[in-house]
Image (tube, rainbow, N blue to C red):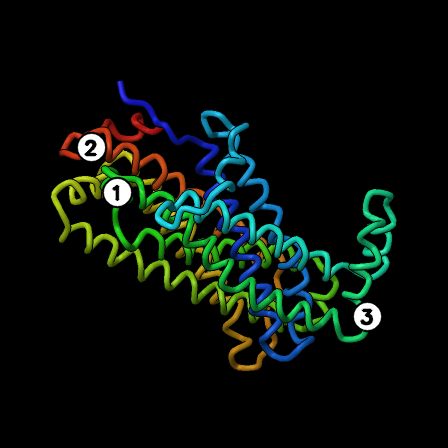
Amino acid sequence: MESFQWGWLIMVYLFLGGLGAGACFVSGLAVYLGGRDAYRNIARWGAYMAPFPVMLGSGLLVFDLFRPWNFYRLFLTLEPTSPMSIGSWLLLVFTGTSLFNAFLWLPREAKERFLSRRRLRRWKRWLEWTWRGDNEERLRSVLAALGLPLSAGVGLYTGILLGAIPARPFWNTPMLAQLFLFSAFSTGTAALIVLTSFTREHALAGGRDAKLLYTLDILLICLEILIIVPFILHAYLATSSIQHSLRLILGGPYTVLFWVGVVGLGLLAPLALEAYEIYPMLFKRQAHHSRALEVASGLLVLTGGLLLRYVFVFGGQMSHFDPGAAIAMAGGAGALP
């Protein structure tokens, strides 16, 4: 009897890693769009959010290893041909950079309280210069520029990690990394839509923040849809094993989850809600400004992103068990883990 080697921990890691990368990407964009202070609220909360989902997800990834106490060996060398080695170093650099960026966005009083702790006093003199004069804004700009490629790398890595595993036809497609990248950025954007809707600055922005986040998420959702179409076409034109694996979402056990959960609830429904919200803004009319719709659209995107990883993590492993027609007859929903 075959079993799933990659379970819920890996699925949650892929989701959290993508969410953190997406938050970092949006924060970096907000720093450079519209001038220094135009989207300050988005940049700040994106910086606060970015490191922690990635740190938690990386912890789950380490815990899922057969011998988690040996994870440090990943950092003893750098293997350019190993996706796991490159990804581990990428996560380490991303975490360090995003933590420092989050620190820079803290209010000065919070920084001083943080550095007044006994164990951190030795760092106080070195870190105090970061908020002197224009140093703070310059460093934020530098870290935002670094965060854009780093977040893209982490977002791609969550898909490359699966695609690099051989003999999993459902994963072995060049479209997977792109789909996971756009989904990562979309979930990060959605999380910021939900989070910033409860901030005072969001209300004072007069819809400016919401317009940016909605526009970005609509673009990302459309890109996800445009990736799904060639993903299916590529599978039809590929080898027979990849064609058979596609039956997992075309009549097989993951059909409802993918088309109703991922595409319907996770893409089309939030796309409609966000288009409804942004439509008046395009014509300089009074926006709806409904927090309920903001939260609903954001949560739908997050749910769809989680379901996407569920379908691909478990479906990809099932395609390895039997790449033939038996996959399509796997017993419907009863075959789900």
Q: Is residue 162 left or right of residue 326?
A: right
Q: Which residue is mark 1?
A: 170
Between disc 3 and disc 2, whose residue precedes? 3
- Verify CB contact (< 8 Å) between mark 3 and mark 2: no
Front residue of 60 and 280 = 60
The residue under label 2 is which amino acid type? Ile
Report whether residue 81 is seen. Answer: yes
SS for callout 3: loop
The residue under label 1 is which amino acid type? Phe
Query: Where 277 falls versus 229 (above or below)?
Result: below
Percent x, y of residue 221: 41, 60
Q: CA distance from mark 3 to mark 2?
A: 62 Å
Disc 2 residue crowd, few under 14, some 14–19, many 20+, Cα 10 Å: many
Mark nearest the camera among 2 and 1 is: 1
At x 50%, y 53%, the residue is 187
Q: Which residue is mark 3?
A: 132
Q: CA distance from mark 3 to mark 1?
A: 52 Å
Disc 3 residue crowd, few under 14, some 14–19, many 20+, Cα 10 Å: few
Tag shown at residue 327: 2
Q: Residue furthest bottom?
A: 284
At x 19%, y 54%, the residue is 234
Q: CA distance from mark 2 to mark 1?
A: 11 Å
Mark nearest the camera among 3 and 1 is: 3
Between disc 2 and disc 1, whose residue precedes? 1
